[in-house]
Amino acid sequence: MTPLDRWVDDAHLYLDREEARDLARMLGDVPDLAEDLLDARTRQTRFGTVDYRTRNGAREQRLPFNPAAARAADHLQSVLGAWVRLVCEQRDVTYGGATSISGMAEWLQRNIIALAMTEGVETAAAEIGAAIEAAETVVCPPAEVAAADADLVLQARAVRLNAAGIGKLAEQLGDTFGNLTARRVRTLRKAGLITPVPGPWSAGWPELFLVGEVLDAHRALPARQHRKDA
């Protein structure tokens, strides 16, 4: 019997049973992903072509480190760690797991009821899912997307741009963000899914947004709403 099976009182919870089950299943997939990230981080996993030849015919040895995988792992670990801290603070519990990605994911899965009782958990699935998707893009990129594109996405997350700038940047980030236009950014803003970076700014100065927050909100908004912006 799982903790969810013993869950009999839905009062004062921020997730219903099905949402909690979906989140628990998502967390259950993270340990395997963490192993794949470790392989990719040390370049034990090959993406596409093998090592290639230089102009003089000699083979060029690839670096034994994948910065895109490192950034994806750091981001996933940061997101999981933030939710672990929030659960511990709000529910007054002590964390007893490992500080690794797998350890935190397994702890959150075991404590899914405490997580469901944590204020703000409604955004957990979107945030954790976006971090998982970014990691999966590095571990197993689509055939048409180079590893460098995944690295570009991860680097872009920390950049602050206005709506027009984000629309231009999205054109370089692959098909996943092909419909992330300036209009789409304004739609996300009106929906309250993204917030501008705090000012103060001069009168008439365009609002700036953290690109990572915009990318996550863009992917989290249901596809049927994506089509409205097309």
Image (spheres, rainbow, N blue to C red):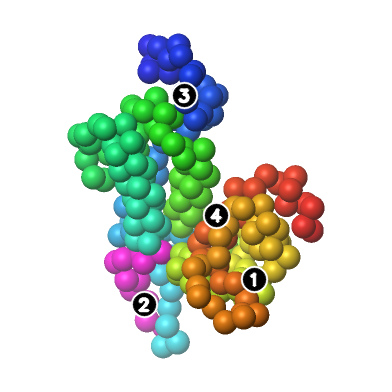
Sequence-wise, the earlier of marks 3 and 2 is 3
Sequence-wise, the earlier of marks 4 and 2 is 2
Name the mark nearer the viewer: 3 or 2: 3
Sequence-wise, the earlier of marks 4 and 1 is 1
Q: Main secondary structure of the magenta part?
A: loop
**Residue 139: percent from left, percent from top:** 44, 53
- Residue density around tag 4, few if under 14, some if 14–19, many if 20 or more, within 10 Å: many
Mark 3 vs mark 1, CA separation in Å: 38 Å
Mark 2 vs mark 1, CA separation in Å: 41 Å
- Residue density around tag 3, few if under 14, some if 14–19, many if 20 or more, within 10 Å: few
- Residue density around tag 1, few if under 14, some if 14–19, many if 20 or more, within 10 Å: many
Q: Secondary structure at mark 3?
A: loop
Mark 4 vs mark 1, CA separation in Å: 15 Å
- Given the image, on which type of amino acid does mark 2 rest? Glu
Q: Secondary structure at mark 1?
A: helix
- Mark 4–mark 1 contact, CB under 8 Å? no
Q: Residue at x 51, y 42 (%)?
A: 123
**Residue 71: percent from left, percent from top:** 38, 62
- Given the image, on which type of amino acid does mark 4 rest? Asp
Q: Which residue is mark 4?
A: 216
- Mark 3–mark 1 contact, CB under 8 Å? no
Residue interval drawn in magenta: 57-68
Sequence-wise, the earlier of marks 4 and 3 is 3
Q: Residue at x 30, y 60 (%)?
A: 42
Q: Which residue is mark 2?
A: 60
Mark 4 vs mark 2, CA separation in Å: 36 Å
Answer with left or right where residue 108 lies relative to residue 131.
left
Q: Is residue 213 visible?
A: yes
